[in-house]
Image (tube, rainbow, N blue to C red):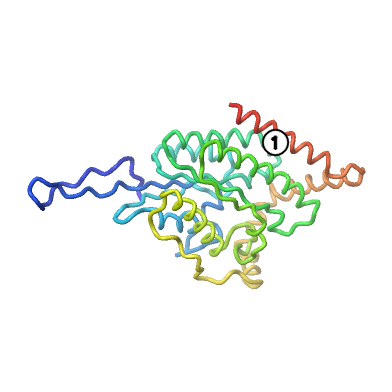
Amino acid sequence: MTPAHGPAPAPADLGGPAGKAAPAAPAPLRFAVLGDSFSEGVGDRAGGTWRGWAALLADGLAGPDQRLDFVNLAVSGALGRDVAEDQAPRAAALRPHLASVVVGVNDTLRHTFDVGLFARRLDHALATLGATGAVLLTACLPDPGRLLGLPGPLARPLARRGGSVNAVVHALSARHGAVHLHLADPAWTADRGLWSADRLHPGERGHRAVAGAFHRLLAARGLARGPAPSPEASEPPPGRAATARWLATAGTGWVLRRSHDLLPQLLLLAGEELLHRTGGSGPGPLDARAETALAEALAATMGG
């Protein structure tokens, strides 16, 4: 839909009791979506394109006879920098009533990962949107190592980084008064029926679950006036055959693209993990280093 930039003018008087104008239509409700593939809708294909939780949620936001202006700016592979520098200014220009910001997983997969820089960028994005008066939606995300079932030396570094990102998201959500959804709970990763063939993105059922959870939070605040999204998926969750087909088609390209950043970085992190373990120090120094970096990031951002 084409985003609106202000309330529509009241319609002209088309009749009725003398001296009384026809009631004005409710102003359009504007919903902007920022982030990466999670919010782009990857894993939930409908009508030949990605749909996802945000579109499912959007259908249940507007009240009776109210138009919804929905724009999804999320892009697969987006980092905190992309959200802060590109997506947030574009979304703010639309003056949204609701704006979702979910980002961070891709940042943890880069060799340039810096939790302090991520915190500053997310804080900037939330402040930019909050300044327009938008109600903010945020979410912490599950551990990708757990989703993929990676062995310990590979999973622990990702869990450490993911935990830091989620801690930042928690703190900044509270600071900016965001409607926050906790998706890092192990229950989200334990139910494989929620996830697509790639095991990193929700499938249709998972996207519907996210949309339903956000709808409940918004409805409790009087911010969702339409029907809740149906939890029932139109397609069954992917089985072994679907996973094999995905790997043989779209998944091959995805894996090759991710191998340029994810695989080398994972191997470096795993090597450091094993080095500490074989040296007898265990994960303690790495945990302490991550905790120090997180504490410094929170102190610098929250103190600002």
**Residue 239 occupies which quadrant of the picture?**
bottom right
108 left or right of 276 in image: left
What is the residue that sits farthest to the top in this orientation? 304
219 left or right of 198 in image: left
What is the residue that sits farthest to the front in this orientation? 220
Q: Local crowd at mark 1 within 10 Å, few (<14), some, or many (≥20)?
A: many
Q: Where is residue 166 in the image (x, y as percent from the top left)?
A: 64, 44
Query: What residue is rendered at 63% in x and 39% in y?
Result: 168
Q: Position of residue 271 (x, y in %)?
A: 83, 46
Query: What residue is rendered at 41% in x and 57% in y?
Result: 60
190 relative to 171, above or below: below
Quarter occupied by the C terminus: top right
Q: Where is residue 99 in the image (x, y as percent from the top left)?
A: 46, 44
Report the residue marked by disc 1. 294
Secondary structure found at label 1: helix
Query: What residue is rendered at 68% in x and 36% in y?
Result: 114
93 left or right of 233 in image: left
Q: Position of residue 67 (x, y in %)?
A: 32, 52
Query: As rendered, which of 281 and 273 lies closer to the eye?
Result: 281
Query: What residue is rendered at 38% in x and 54% in y?
Result: 225
Q: Which amino acid does label 1 sit on?
A: Leu
